[in-house]
């Protein structure tokens, strides 16, 4: 058995009747394989069954510790009911984009059954262009962005197929009894003081950098006091950096979410984004952040809700080492960065984003890679879910600092075509989730020559997230036009100055 880390367990604890803890990927495929076989649930079931030995996360079942004395365990069930996990449905005619997004929103709004391995695959027929959509849901307790991509790389091929492998025997673990799990919980209970002592020196001076709690009353004071104590012990030597002062102004997204979602999908040219990057001497991620910032600025302004202060964004990042590749679970941290929605000039926004992202990355390097996990050790497992619910109740409360306005994630993807059982993948859209106090999530994944955007919002907060996507396309056009006005490799600060002269 494999025990969940405190960070893995946090994605279970965060779930309630309104918040889901899974992440998803929506692939759009040709309707049949190169050999002419239709892409349907039977093909997907056969494929998953053949590669069962390569998919441990598809075999894992949760084993809870009685009374939540310790973190849960994954038990390798050895097999699963593939008929249950792989489902099939069809859109009504005409099967347009709106109908697909509505169906995806309904599916991601339902939680996974914790008595079974925490994943589902939906094969969706009836798309108006003859394609087939395949939506894969996986719980965040088992995978993060990088390990989720590893799972998809097992299911997908970079050719029209792969050599048939001989069947591998998977040795199933017997599911433990309540008595056995209670005994494990008692052992874990005795080790908890040691966990806290180990985590204290690492986590306490940085508590105001933990995204889920930094906005709560008293956290800053605890972190500040811990830094002073640490500095005194070291006789005035170097100490931990102070927590960031970035705050999130209030928008409609800083509210408690409902159980229901809306989604929007769209693609932008990766080639054009790279051209903008080369012109202004920044990174692809800087340009992606600028596009998202421009879209949010324009959309909020049109709604008459644009704050005078810049927005604040959470940006997840992987801290997975090469040795941890293929181990699944969560190896992530979160950067907090300023999104200059208060700036009307697109090049100036890009310049400020470049500086803000550089500063955030430098700050992240100074923090322990295990900070999110270590901070959780101060909460006994028995109180984990209650603490998560209490934190959720504070999200969106007026008068309290809010953690962030939006979650933005950029996941590198494959540059070559992929195939599902021989059916060519046309596009691959990421679908993440929203939280209390952060009612919008923008996730981006590259695929071949495209950047694939997936926007998820709470249904009660936004009527149509495709309007945000349209605003992001306009932001991309602004940057493209600004790039055409300057010579390649123009330093960003000089380009911003030229842009200012051109608009005056």
Image: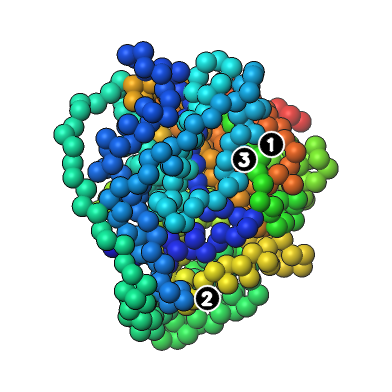
Q: Give the distance between the C-alpha atoms of the residues marked 2 and 1, in whole angstroms.
A: 36 Å
For disc 1, the marked residue is 465
Q: Secondary structure at mark 2?
A: helix
Q: Is residue 80 left or right of residue 244?
A: left
Q: Secondary structure at mark 1?
A: loop
Question: Is tag 1's residue or tag 3's residue first in the polypeptide sequence?
Answer: 3
Q: Secondary structure at mark 3?
A: helix
Q: Quadrant of residue 351 in the image?
A: top right
Res. 367 in view: no
Question: Is tag 2's residue or tag 3's residue first in the polypeptide sequence?
Answer: 3
Question: Is tag 2's residue or tag 1's residue first in the polypeptide sequence?
Answer: 2
Q: Give the distance between the C-alpha atoms of the residues marked 1 and 3, in whole angstroms.
A: 15 Å
For disc 2, the marked residue is 383
Closest to the observer, 11 or 444: 11
Point out the residue furthest to the left here.
166
Q: Are marks 2 and 1 in contact (CB under 8 Å)?
A: no
Residue at position x 32%, y 14% in the image: 35
Res. 431 in view: yes
For disc 3, the marked residue is 106
2 or 3: mark nearer the eye: 3
* Mark 3 crowdedness (10 Å alpha carbons): few <14, some 14-19, many ≥20: some
């Amino acid at each position: 058995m494999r025990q969940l880390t405190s960070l893995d367990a946090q994605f279970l604890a965060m779930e309630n009747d309104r918040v889901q803890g899974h992440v998803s990927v929506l692939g759009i495929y040709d309707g049949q394989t190169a050999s002419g076989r239709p892409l349907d649930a039977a093909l997907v079931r056969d494929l998953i069954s053949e590669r069962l030995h390569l998919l441990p996360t598809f075999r894992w079942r949760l084993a809870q510790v009685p009374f939540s004395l310790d973190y849960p365990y994954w038990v390798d069930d050895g097999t699963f009911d593939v008929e249950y996990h792989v489902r099939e449905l069809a859109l009504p005619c005409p099967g347009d984009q709106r109908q697909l997004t509505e169906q995806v929103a309904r599916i991601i709004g339902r939680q996974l059954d914790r008595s079974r391995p925490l994943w589902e695959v939906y094969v969706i027929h009836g798309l108006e262009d003859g394609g087939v959509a395949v939506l894969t849901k996986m719980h965040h307790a088992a995978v993060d962005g990088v390990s989720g991509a590893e799972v998809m790389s097992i299911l997908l091929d970079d050719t029209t197929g792969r050599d048939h492998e001989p069947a591998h025997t998977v040795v199933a673990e017997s599911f433990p009894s309540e008595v056995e799990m209670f005994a494990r919980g008692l052992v874990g209970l005795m080790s908890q003081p040691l966990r806290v002592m180990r985590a204290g020196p690492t986590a306490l001076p940085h508590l105001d950098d933990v995204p889920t709690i930094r906005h709560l009353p008293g956290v800053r004071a605890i972190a500040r006091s811990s830094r002073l104590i640490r500095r005194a012990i070291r006789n005035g030597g170097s100490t931990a950096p102070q927590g960031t002062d970035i705050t999130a102004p209030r928008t409609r997204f800083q509210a408690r979410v409902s159980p229901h979602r809306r989604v929007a999908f769209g693609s932008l040219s990766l080639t054009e984004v790279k051209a903008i990057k080369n012109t202004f001497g920044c990174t692809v991620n800087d340009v992606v952040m600028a596009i998202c910032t421009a879209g949010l600025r324009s959309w909020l302004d049109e709604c008459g809700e644009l704050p005078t202060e810049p927005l604040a964004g959470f940006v997840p990042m992987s801290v997975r080492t090469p040795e941890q590749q293929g181990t699944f679970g969560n190896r992530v941290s979160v950067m907090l960065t300023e999104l200059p929605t208060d700036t009307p000039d697109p090049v100036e926004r890009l310049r400020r984003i470049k500086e803000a992202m550089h500063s955030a990355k430098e700050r992240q390097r100074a923090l322990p890679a295990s900070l999110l996990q270590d901070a959780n050790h101060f909460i006994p497992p028995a109180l984990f879910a209650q603490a998560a619910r209490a934190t959720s109740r504070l999200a969106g409360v007026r008068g309290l600092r809010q953690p962030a306005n939006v979650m933005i994630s950029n996941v590198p993807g494959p540059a070559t075509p992929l195939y599902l059982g021989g059916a060519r993948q046309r596009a691959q859209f990421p679908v993440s989730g929203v939280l209390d106090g952060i009612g919008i999530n923008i996730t981006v994944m590259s695929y071949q020559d495209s950047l694939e955007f997936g926007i998820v919002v709470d249904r009660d907060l936004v009527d149509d997230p495709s309007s945000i996507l349209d605003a992001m396309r306009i932001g991309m056009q602004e940057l493209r036009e600004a790039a055409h006005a300057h010579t390649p490799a123009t330093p960003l600060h000089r380009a911003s100055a030229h842009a200012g002269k051109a608009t005056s």
